[in-house]
């Protein structure tokens, strides 16, 4: 394995320390040595550097001297060369062997390269839309971060369960039924879908300002839903169907799927257990008639469990859902991909689960992300700048189509590619930076073919495909690759990035951070383009050409996988 370069170097260091300093037994095991290894800031300082000051206290020797001693004791020319420089021991890969080994591993493993067989179970609660509300760009991040994490975990061999925890419970649905009964028309709503429902909801609020009795009516309808009144349930389920129908169009465009749509309402009959258990464990207290769990000892406001009228709350349902998921899926971790504004909510009810005595409370993880604004404007849900996702994605396709028509007029399937590029641009913009950072979405930034963008990385992938297509149609002699054709800095930069790709994927999973894959993807694309401009590939001499084509094949394979992992398509021509 190429990851082993670091491992092998760590072993060399460990052995050299043992030989040169026999008294310092057990001072440095391989793992510690590997942990100390750094990637030097400059190319001419080697591929890895070992900072000898780490040992100087224990060995009672100056770092410079340690570096020289160890360098003299290390000889592994097939692997690397060790040179002392100041207090550092710098390691220079044997470039030809490194190239051969890396490319073999990448190409032999194929799409399994960087993947794993972890076997653990992870629930991912994401997207979690609200019934009767249109999907706006505020829901983009949860959808794409969750979707990407799911792909990353699947790739690493986890068993994943993706859950859309629908927001399908609350008094607003009583109001909506009441509005529908007054002003709704079945056909109109059936055709208009969520948009029609939203209009009804807005109308309800306008009219209720003049006629407050409407509020009571709304409450009465909600009570009917709670009591299982057939008419109320029928209408409400229909609203749900309409919402899911409209939302499905967006999920289809994004390629997002779910294993479960069990939302808040699903837990109606599972709430009693929570209440009984909280009571039995003496955690429930009364406060102004409401039932709460006191969290004073954790410096948090109390977690509200039951309202005065006995109604359950968002947190109550989340607790019920967590217990249900643990029983049903036996998860090792359960992730909640939800905006950071809900931070307190999650900290509170995670604490409640902990107080209930469940040690798996530590496996509940709020994967928080920042806000998204659109061309400098924050999203106001009340009238004004709401940007609906469906419109955003359609516009992305149209704009990409204009660009593609101009750049590649001969493409056979411009519409298809435009969808891949336009939607990809939006996804890339969303997953480019650390998730906690706020995002400001700008069209000309997202759709730029130069710079760090979706189209740029997709284009690099298409470029690799084009090089390989041309190579296949030229009848060059079949020769064994000579990897010395890859010992220049540019090729070595790419190889280093390819060899670290598995590490990037693991780190992305460990930190719930798809942007780590986005970054790896972007760095590989950039380094390949540099290489492409500096070196001839197709008309290089045959042995060198073979090596450079192998490199191109490896880059193409990893770019495609990385794009897939963040939820983007990889068109072969664009
Ligand atoms: N529907 C909620 C919202 O849009 C998000 C739900 C997140 N998931 C959860 N289990 N609380 O704000």
Image (cartoon, helix red, strand yellow):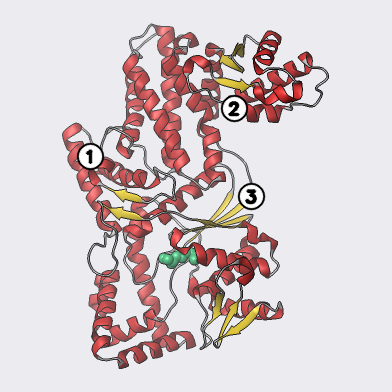
For the residue carrying disc 2, how many other residues have a C-alpha within 10 Å: few (<14), some (14-19), or many (20+)?
Answer: some
Question: Of tags 1 and 2, which is closer to the observer?
Answer: 2
What mark, if any, has residue 120 been given in the picture? Answer: 3
Residue 324 visible within the image: yes
State the CA–CA distance, disc 3 to disc 1. Answer: 41 Å
State the CA–CA distance, disc 2 to disc 3. Answer: 23 Å
State the CA–CA distance, disc 1 to disc 2. Answer: 40 Å
- Closer-to-camera residue (267/298): 298
- Closer-to-camera residue (15/54): 54
* Quarter of the figure with the C terminus: top left
Q: Which of disc 1 and disc 3 is earlier in sequence?
A: 3
What mark, if any, has residue 414 been given in the picture? Answer: 1
For the residue carrying disc 3, how many other residues have a C-alpha within 10 Å: few (<14), some (14-19), or many (20+)?
Answer: some
Residue at 34 percent of width and 54 percent of height: 372
Disc 2 marks which residue? 3
Relative to 511, 142 lies left or right: left
Question: Of tags 2 and 3, which is closer to the observer?
Answer: 2
Residue 461 pos. (x, y %): 36, 30
Residue at 55 percent of width and 17 percent of height: 98
Q: Which of disc 2 and disc 1 is earlier in sequence?
A: 2
Number of numbered discs visible in the structure rendering: 3
Residue 532 pos. (x, y %): 34, 19
225 versus 457 height, above or below: below
Label 3 CB-ligand 1 distance < 8 A: no
């Amino acid at each position: 394995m190429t990851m082993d370069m670091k491992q092998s170097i760590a072993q060399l260091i460990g052995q050299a320390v043992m030989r040169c300093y026999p008294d310092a037994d057990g001072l440095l095991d391989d793992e510690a040595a590997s942990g100390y290894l750094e990637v030097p800031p400059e190319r001419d300082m080697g591929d890895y550097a070992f900072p000898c000051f780490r040992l100087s206290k224990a060995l009672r020797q100056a770092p410079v001297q340690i570096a020289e001693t160890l360098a003299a004791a290390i000889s592994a020319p097939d692997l690397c060369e060790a040179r002392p420089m100041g207090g550092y021991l710098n390691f220079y890969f044997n470039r030809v062997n490194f190239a051969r080994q890396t490319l073999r591993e990448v190409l032999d493993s194929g799409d399994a390269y960087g993947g794993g067989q972890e076997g653990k179970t992870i629930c991912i609660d994401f997207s979690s839309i609200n019934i009767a509300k249109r999907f706006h760009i505020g829901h983009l991040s949860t959808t794409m971060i969750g979707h990407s994490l799911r792909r990353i975990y699947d790739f690493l061999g986890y068993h994943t369960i993706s859950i859309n925890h629908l927001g399908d419970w609350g008094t607003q649905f009583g109001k909506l039924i009441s509005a529908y009964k007054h002003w709704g028309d079945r056909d109109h709503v059936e055709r208009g879908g969520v948009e029609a429902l939203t209009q009804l909801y807005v109308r309800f609020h306008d009219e209720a300002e003049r006629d407050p009795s409407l509020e009571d009516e709304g409450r009465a309808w909600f009570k009917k839903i709670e009591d299982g009144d057939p008419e109320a349930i029928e209408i409400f389920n229909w609203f749900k169907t309409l919402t899911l129908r409209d939302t499905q169009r967006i999920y289809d465009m994004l390629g997002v799927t779910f294993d479960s749509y069990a939302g808040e309402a699903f837990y109606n009959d599972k709430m009693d257990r929570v209440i009984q258990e909280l009571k039995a464990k003496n955690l429930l207290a009364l406060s102004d008639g409401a039932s709460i769990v006191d969290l004073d000892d954790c410096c948090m406001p109390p977690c509200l469990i039951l309202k005065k009228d006995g109604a359950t709350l968002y947190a109550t349902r989340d607790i019920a859902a967590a217990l249900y998921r643990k029983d049903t899926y036996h998860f090792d971790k359960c992730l909640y991909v939800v905006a950071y504004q809900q931070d307190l909510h999650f900290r509170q009810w995670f604490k409640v689960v902990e107080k209930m005595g469940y040690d798996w409370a530590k496996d509940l993880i709020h994967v928080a992300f920042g806000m998204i604004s659109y061309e400098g404007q924050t999203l106001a849900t009340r009238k004004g700048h709401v940007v609906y996702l469906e419109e955003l994605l359609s516009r992305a396709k149209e704009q990409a189509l204009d660009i593609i028509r101009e750049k590649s007029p001969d493409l056979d399937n411009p519409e298809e590619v435009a969808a891949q590029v336009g939607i990809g641009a939006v996804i890339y913009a969303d997953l480019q930076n650390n998730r906690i950072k706020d995002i400001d979405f700008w069209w000309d930034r997202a759709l730029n073919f130069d710079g760090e963008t979706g189209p740029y990385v997709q284009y690099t992938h298409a470029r690799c495909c084009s090089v390989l297509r041309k190579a296949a149609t030229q009848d060059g002699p079949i020769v064994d690759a000579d990897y010395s054709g890859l010992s220049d800095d540019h090729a070595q930069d790419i190889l280093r990035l390819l060899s670290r790709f598995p590490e990037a994927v693991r780190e992305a999973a460990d930190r719930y951070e798809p942007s780590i894959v986005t970054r790896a993807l972007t760095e590989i694309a950039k380094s390949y383009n540099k290489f492409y401009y500096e070196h001839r590939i197709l008309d290089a001499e045959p042995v060198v050409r073979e090596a450079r084509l192998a490199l191109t094949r490896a880059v193409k394979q990893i770019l495609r996988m990385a794009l897939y992992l963040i939820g983007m398509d990889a068109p072969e021509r664009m």
